[in-house]
Image (cartoon, rainbow, N blue to C red):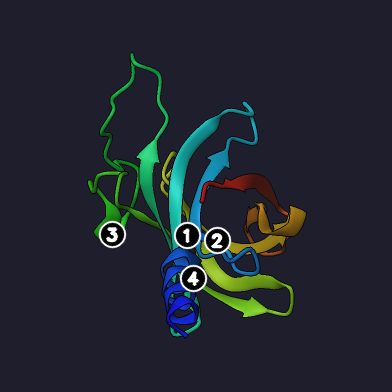
Amino acid sequence: MRSFVLAALIGAVALPAFADNTSPVGLWKNIDDKTGKPKAEIRISEANGVLQGRIEKLFRPADQEQNPICDKCEGADKGKPLIGLNIINGMKKDGTEYSGGTILDPENGKVYKSKMKLADDGKKLDVRGYIGMPMLGRSQTWVRQE
């Protein structure tokens, strides 16, 4: 009985180390759709069935500002540091996709409608930002980091 309790405790402690590949919650590296290079790490979290995503780390050349602010953003985000900035807001599960929310492009300060879908057994996340209809936008593939 003692070994069963010990095994259960070890299993309970180890369980959080495994990523839930059925949900986009977790840490993601976004890959620039133009250059193919990593741009940032974004942490997606969920509260009451609604997803949001915040920039945790930037990948920038040494000759660029390492702690830039969102100078092109509008409203409350204007002048905020990119690290810590919420760029995904209001996404909800809709069948096999997540939609109904927005994504902010800090490079131009614009907010787009967005949809996301897990791919490659939850190891990748296809993220699309668009204006009006999903056909009028651009996509990135993000790679799960944990």
| Relative depth, front residue between 105 and 53 | 53
Q: Return the x and y of residue 76 as percentages of the image width and height.
A: 25, 60
Q: Amino acid at mark 2?
A: Ala
Mark 2 — residue?
A: 19
Q: Residue at x 42, y 30 (%)?
A: 59
Disc 2 to disc 4: CB gap under 8 Å: no
Above or below 60: residue 131: below
- Could you say which is closer to the camera, residue 18 or residue 125? 18
Q: What residue sits right under mark 1 in the picture?
A: 17
Q: Look at discs 2 and 1 and give the one toward the viewer.
A: 1
Label 3: which residue? 75
**Residue in the foreground of this view, choosing between 61 and 112:** 61
Specify few, some or many for label 4: CA neighbours under 10 Å numbering under 14, 14-19, or 20 or more: few
Q: Earlier in the sequence, mark 3 or mark 1?
A: 1
Amino acid type shown at disc 3: Gly
Cα distance in 3D space between marks 3 and 1: 38 Å
Q: Say whether residue 98 is left or right of residue 106.
A: right
From this viewpoint, is residue 145 visible? Answer: yes
Q: Is residue 89 visible?
A: no
Secondary structure beneath dot 4 equals: helix
The local crowd at label 2, few if under 14, some if 14 to 19, many if 20 or more residues have their Cα within 10 Å, is: some
Q: Nearer the viewer, mark 4 or mark 1?
A: 4
- Pinpoint residue 125: horizontal percent, then vertical percent: 65, 54
